[in-house]
Image: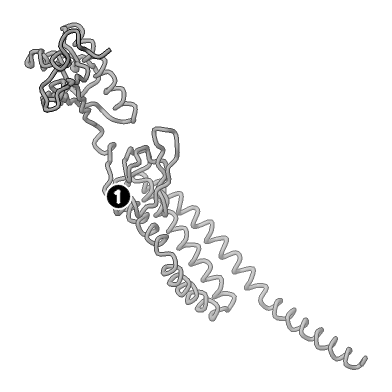
Amino acid sequence: MFSDLDKATDLVIDKLGVWYSETVKLLPNFVVAIIIVIIFWVMAKFIRNILSRVLTRILKNRSAVDLAMALTSFLIILVGLVIALEIMGWHTAVTSVLASIGVIGLALGLAFQDAASNLISGVSMAIHSPINVGDIIESNDIMGTVTQIGLRSTTIYDPHGQDVVIPNRMIFQSPYRHYTINGIRRIDLACGISYGDNLPDVEKVVQEAIRKIDYIRKDRPVEFFYTEFGDSSINFVVRYWVTFKRIPDYLRAQSDGIKNIKAAFNEHSITIPFPIRTLDFGIKGGQTLAQMYPKGNQPS
């Protein structure tokens, strides 16, 4: 029994000796490989900083800049890792790793099609889309300011103070409104007047009231249109433009328009009528309460 134990011990010691010898042989290459990885990591960081300064001046889309820097850093570090593996003499390992990455990537692409679609959409948005951080957009019934554009999703800060995260493919594949790209927005303010008011006078009063808003765009006309004969009013819409940089710019212009029109109507005795309903008490129509119940016969 002791002889078998001695043989096992000798075998383990011989194996450890071989491993030690191999480790000593590989130690210089291992140190060089570590140095190579560090050099490429520092190089990636240095090139990333230079690339950020250059691309920021050329491209307005911050997401495209971030994407370019991330890809550049990844490729530089990947090259460093491949060189390090070559120095270690692990040629087979390099081939196996690259093949495994390809197979895993294909499998993940099939298993997570939505995630892959969001990733591709994020890359396309970063390169081609005019949407940038700080822009005001409306997509999928969500309106707000873009705070972050990632490779998988876009974050919008809505007027209620909430962050709404929308998958990139939903923005990329659907129509969206971009309010910032032109820097202006039109207010369509609807109202109604009584049938007894003079229509040309009302038009003039409303346009003058809107022009008193000092921050509206002077290069755009104040337009006035009557739209319909309502149940109790003649309805109209007045349209005017404001510079639009923040969501409150629109709300403020709309509020000031309402206040100015109401004050002008009070000054010129123009009536905004309440809804009026006519009660018909006849079975076939056209009968008032007095006709249905002559004097002295009204129900108590």
**Above or below for 249 versus 177:** above
Q: Compare residues 114 and 16 and report the one nearer the observer.
A: 114
Residue 27 or residue 290, whichever sits in front: 290
Front one among 114 and 218: 114
| Residue at left offset 33%, top offset 37% | 136
Res 219 seen here: no
Residue 225 lies left or right of residue 181; in this view the side is: left
Q: Quadrant of the N terminus?
A: bottom right
Residue at the farthest front position: 297
Q: Residues within 10 Å of mark 1 (few under 14, many from 20)?
A: some
Above or below residue 259? Residue 267 is above
- Residue 240 in view here: yes
The residue identified by callout 1 is 129
At label 1, which amino acid type do we have? Ser
Question: Residue 74 placed where, x, y %?
Answer: 47, 60
Place of residue 265 in the rendered image (x, y in percent of width and height, measured from the top left): 19, 11
* 196 is higher (above) or lower (below) than 173: above
Q: Secondary structure at mark 1?
A: loop
Question: Residue at the spot x=25%, y=14% of the render?
Answer: 299
Indicate left or right for 297 with 7 as reference. Answer: left
